[in-house]
Amino acid sequence: MLGTILLIVLILMLIGAIPAWPHSKNWGYGPSGGLGLIVIILIVLLLLGRL
């Protein structure tokens, strides 16, 4: 159950990090960098068996 919720949230964050709108083109690497950090943390937690 928790894995499904995390997968849905991750997909929504990936869609939100795409700079497709004019107001978000000036954001730079912030959204995708933060998303990458979250993905790395989730992978480490999965490998350690804490998730």
Image (spheres, grey):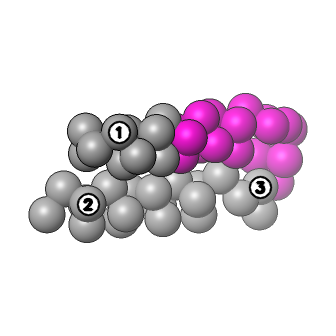
Residue type highlighted by circle 2: Gly
Q: Is mark 3 on a helix, strand or loop?
A: loop
Q: From which residue to which does the magenta span run?
A: 22-40
Asked if 37 appears above or below 42 in the picture, the reply is above
Residue type highlighted by circle 1: Leu
Q: How crowded is mark 2: few (under 14 residues within 10 Å), some or many (20 or more)?
A: few
Q: What element carries label 1?
A: helix
Tell me the quarter of the image containing the C terminus. top left
Asked if 17 appears above or below 37 in the picture, the reply is below
Residue farthest toward the front in the current orientation of the protein? 48
Query: Which residue is denoted by mark 2 in the rendering?
Result: 3
Q: What element carries label 2?
A: helix
Residue 42 visible somewhere in the drawing: no
**Mark 1, mark 2: which one is toward the viewer?**
1
Residue ID at (56%, 40%) = 40
Q: Which mark is residue 19?
A: 3
Tell me the quarter of the image containing the N terminus. bottom left
Q: Which mark is residue 48?
A: 1
Asked if 27 appears above or below 8 in the picture, the reply is above
Of the numbered discs 1 and 2, the one sitting upstream in the chain is 2
Residue 38's spot in the image, x, y percent?
51, 38
Q: Residues within 10 Å of mark 3 (few under 14, many from 20)?
A: some
Q: Nearer the viewer, residue 37 or 30?
A: 37
Q: Answer left or right for 3 relative to 45.
A: left
Label pair 3/1, CB-CB below 8 angstroms = no
Q: Answer left or right for 28 relative to 43.
A: right
Of the numbered discs 2 and 3, the one sitting upstream in the chain is 2
**Mark 3, mark 1: which one is toward the viewer?**
1
